[in-house]
Amino acid sequence: MNRRDFARSVAGTLLAPSALAHGSAATERPSTPVNGDFTAAPFQLSVMLWTVFRDLPFERRLEKVAEAGYRNVELVGEYATWKDADFEPANAKRKELGMAFDCTAGLKHGLCNPADREALLTELRSTLPIMERIECPAIILLSGNVVPGMPMEAQHQSCIDGLEAAAALVEGKKIKGESVRVLLENIDQEENPKYFLTSVARGFEIVKAVNHPQVQFLYDFFHEQIAEGNLTTASSQWNSCLPVTLSPSCALRAHWRRPELPTFRCRIC
């Protein structure tokens, strides 16, 4: 099963009233419209822009996403080749459509190899001004691939050290009133058999060790189900503090603000 099939199979469950564990909750921006009206859901829906309308100009892609009823977009470095003149129409279209760039990714260096740390931090430093320019308050950092010959615990510690260094770079920074967040993401071994962080449990351990409010765990349920299976059982320990009921095929990605307090955004891809 691919991401699109996985998300499609649970779309009804995510939006049904029976899926809400704790009633309605306030959201910063409206979620997905149903019959022309925006629903009050305790999670927001976000489209990974690279997965849709890839043959269209950037602004037209935003229009197509908005036409489908979504107001949040996740980027993967689409701005990397932009010139100064490209930012103005992109921002103008985003504002015209009432959309937000809620997250970005695409850094080329990872966390688990200490030798890559300075290059990763250099990338992050250079990306932060772009995030401010497009009003995007969150960025995903990846663990990177397993380092041959290096003990797993050393790579685990490198992720902690790298995130602590990243936290120092974003300390106290805000974009459009929101604290800049660094998100650590798990990826399954089917998508990348060399990836270090395939375990959600290890991801929680890393973020707990960093213990910084601007460093969060992006709990990708799709990757978790592929990597370890038994999603409901594996995540049952978090049920008491999750704002939605977990199902065996729940497609939510959680931006884990603190180990005890997650926020959710459903990724459409």
Image (tube, rainbow, N blue to C red):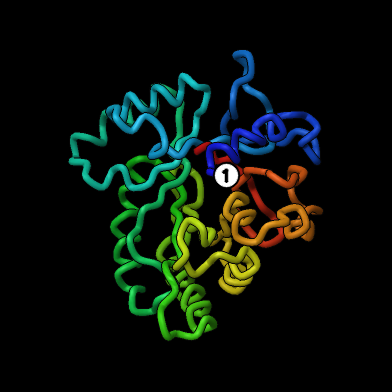
The image shows residue 36, relative to residue 236, as above or below, that is: above
Residue positioned 53% across, 43% down in the render: 2
Residue positioned 60% across, 74% down in the render: 209
Q: Which residue is mark 1?
A: 1
Residue 155 appears in the figure: yes
The image shows residue 130, relative to residue 184, as above or below, that is: above
The image shows residue 101, relative to residue 131, as above or below, that is: above
Q: How many marks?
A: 1
Front residue of 84/106: it is 106
Q: Is residue 65 left or right of residue 32?
A: left
Residue 185 appears in the figure: no
Front residue of 189/103: it is 189
Q: Position of residue 168 (x, y in %)?
A: 44, 68
Quarter of the picture containing the N terminus is top right
Image quarter of residue 250: top right
Q: Position of residue 58 (x, y in %)?
A: 30, 31
In the current view of this chain or complex, which residue is farthest to the top? 35
Residue positioned 46% across, 46% down in the render: 103
Q: Position of residue 114 (x, y in %)?
A: 39, 79
Q: Residues within 10 Å of mark 1 (few under 14, many from 20)?
A: few
Q: Is residue 153 left or right of residue 241?
A: left
Front residue of 26/82: it is 82
Image quarter of residue 78: top left
Q: Secondary structure at mark 1?
A: loop
Q: Amino acid at mark 1?
A: Met
